[in-house]
């Protein structure tokens, strides 16, 4: 095989250096509860520099890692603002429904009702995370769908992707709007119900059926 001089190879190795010198920079605090507590006298962050926070790790109340990632996953043709409006509209629908249920509930039932739409979204996405994934592996001219364990960040992405595709199908067929479908799926998923939970279970069943090919991982 001849590689032309102008060909550009994509590196898959980890970066050997960082913009932050490990000797003088330390990790920032993103948890709001920890920010309220003073640093101990022997904490290195008292006299060293702090790394910049990522945009989805800011401790402000109006930013949330799951919501920010869901906005990016639901984006189409680079229209991020449209995606953000749909996701935030879905959270508003969840908030209104939970408050309606809270107003109608008795004094004993009210503490059991979750009013935070962010918390419902986090629990719903977490319940939809698959434990395994299928990946094609070719052996002897035949491609096998081999089950592989999945990392948490990729599992979160796949959960959002499954939910996004299901909501898009419902909106495409005219059953409902995307924001309404997303709100319904998040609420059902927070209770371990809904089409996204079923899709995750079907994936697990397929992985279980293909476990005989697990020795092809290496």
Image (cartoon, rainbow, N blue to C red):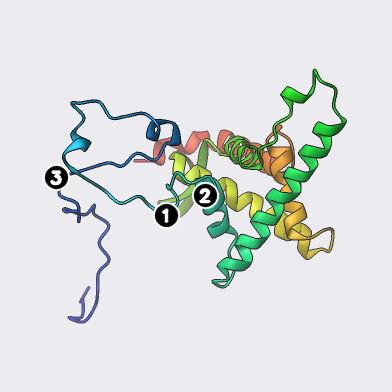
Rendered image quadrant of residue 153: top left
**Is the C-beta separation of discs 1 and 2 under 8 Å?**
yes
Q: Is residue 107 left or right of residue 36?
A: right
Give the numbered dot on residue 55: 1
Give the numbered dot on residue 24: 3
- Rendered view: 14 above or below 132: below
Crowd around label 3: few <14 · some 14–19 · many ≥20 (10 Å): few
Viewer-nearest residue: 98 or 138: 98
Q: Which is nearer the N-term, disc 1 or disc 2?
A: 1
Q: CA distance from mark 1 to mark 2?
A: 9 Å
Is there any visible trace of residue 145 in the rendered image? no
Crowd around label 2: few <14 · some 14–19 · many ≥20 (10 Å): some
Give the numbered dot on residue 63: 2
Secondary structure, mark 3, is: loop
Rendered image quadrant of residue 96: top right
Q: Which is nearer the N-term, disc 3 or disc 1?
A: 3
Secondary structure, mark 2, is: loop
Across and down, in percent, residue 207 comes to 56, 38
Residue at image position (72%, 45%) is 185
């Amino acid at each position: 095989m001849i590689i032309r001089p102008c060909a550009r190879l994509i590196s898959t190795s980890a970066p050997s250096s960082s913009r932050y010198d490990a000797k003088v920079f330390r990790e920032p605090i993103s948890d709001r509860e920890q920010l309220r507590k003073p640093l101990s006298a022997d904490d290195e962050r008292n006299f060293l520099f702090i790394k910049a926070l990522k945009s989805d790790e800011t401790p402000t109340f109006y930013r949330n890692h799951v919501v920010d990632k869901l906005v990016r996953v639901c984006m189409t043709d680079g229209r991020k603002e449209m995606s953000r409006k749909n996701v935030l509209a879905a959270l508003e629908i969840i908030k209104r429904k939970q408050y309606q249920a809270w107003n109608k509930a008795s004094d004993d039932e009210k503490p059991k009702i979750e009013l935070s739409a962010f918390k419902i979204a986090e629990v719903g996405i977490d319940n939809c995370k698959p434990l395994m994934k299928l990946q094609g592996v070719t052996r002897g001219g035949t491609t096998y769908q081999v089950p592989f364990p999945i990392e948490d960040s990729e599992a979160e992405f796949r959960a959002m992707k499954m939910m996004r595709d299901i909501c898009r199908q419902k909106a495409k067929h005219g059953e409902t709007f995307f924001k309404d479908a997303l709100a319904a799926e998040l609420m059902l998923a927070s209770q371990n119900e809904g089409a996204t939970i079923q899709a995750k279970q079907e994936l697990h069943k397929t992985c279980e059926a293909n476990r005989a090919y697990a020795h092809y991982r290496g």
